[in-house]
Amino acid sequence: MTAPREGPRERSWAKEAPRDQAESAFTPILRRLLHRARGVLAVAFVDGEGECVDYCSSLSPFETKVAGAQMLVTMSELAERIRRVGGGESYALTVHCERRDFVVRRVNEAYLLLVALKRGALTRRLRGGIEHTVTELRREALIEVPRWEPVLDSVRVEVREAVGWPYAPAAYFGDDGQRRAIEVVLGRWFQGARSRMCFRVRTEDGHELTLMHDRSTDRWERG
């Protein structure tokens, strides 16, 4: 999903620290997550050796990279113990601490995403943003979806400004990764105490479908 533009008050209070490496194609993806919600301190894309592929952070580069390496070790050790007791593959870990919280999300067998947060800053919407970031990283790095990935009925959607509504879908991406532009929005309504915004749309090739946006998790579904 390409999110609606956010005003300055909605952006993260965190100010990015000076970088110690050049930006890459992953930097904008990580930066969007850093500024997605208040309380996000650092976001790092880490490989299987504990090296930081890229990051965006209000913390120092050294602190961010050490956190990424340490959480890789923690995740790896925990995953091995869980496999031993028949729990299968572990793909996510949330750690709540006295001063900070950490979310570790595996991208595949060789890479993971680390998010460091101010204590208590983790919300359903931010969890949705983390999942979306994982999808974006896989797309940019040409990483296939692992066999252990949980099946979620979600779809990537681009949005535009709309009259009388905060936003409306402009295009969506099918299972084949192809962008399908939306010609017209046929109807709009809410479900579930206004937590889900639904759009009945027609694409440029004449196909009609419903796109539903869960605003609490910032995830789109196709109906």
Image: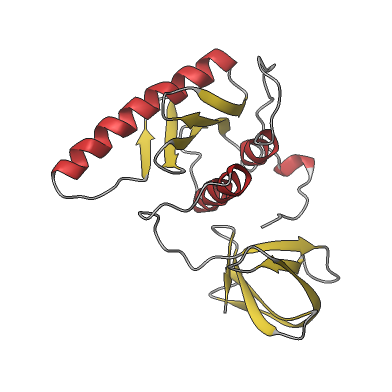
Q: Looking at the image, which residue sits at the far left?
A: 85
Task: Indicate the position of residue 107 as horizontal and vertical percent values.
Answer: 47, 43
Here the colouring is secondary structure
Residue at the image position 36 percent from the left and 40 percent from the top = 93
| Quadrant the N terminus occupies | bottom right
Callout count: 0
Is 222 or 42 nearer to us in this picture? 222
- Horizontal arrangement in the rendering, residue 40 relative to residue 200 (left or right): left
- Horizontal arrangement in the rendering, residue 214 relative to residue 201 (left or right): left
Q: Looking at the image, which residue sits at the far right?
A: 163
- Horizontal arrangement in the rendering, residue 3 relative to residue 67 (left or right): right
Residue at the image position 46 percent from the left and 17 percent from the top = 66
- Horizontal arrangement in the rendering, residue 219 relative to residue 15 (left or right): left
Where on the picture, by quarter, is residue 162? bottom right
Task: Decide: is 44 above or below 7.
Answer: above
Task: Indicate the position of residue 169 as horizontal and vertical percent values.
Answer: 74, 68
Is 86 or 188 nearer to us in this picture? 86
| Quadrant the C terminus occupies | bottom right
Task: Indicate the position of residue 48 as horizontal and vertical percent values.
Answer: 41, 30
Residue at the image position 51 percent from the left and 50 percent from the top = 131
Is 121 or 181 nearer to us in this picture? 181
Residue at the image position 19 percent from the left and 37 percent from the top = 81
Task: Indicate the position of residue 149 as horizontal and vertical percent values.
Answer: 40, 55
Where on the picture, by quarter, is residue 221? bottom right
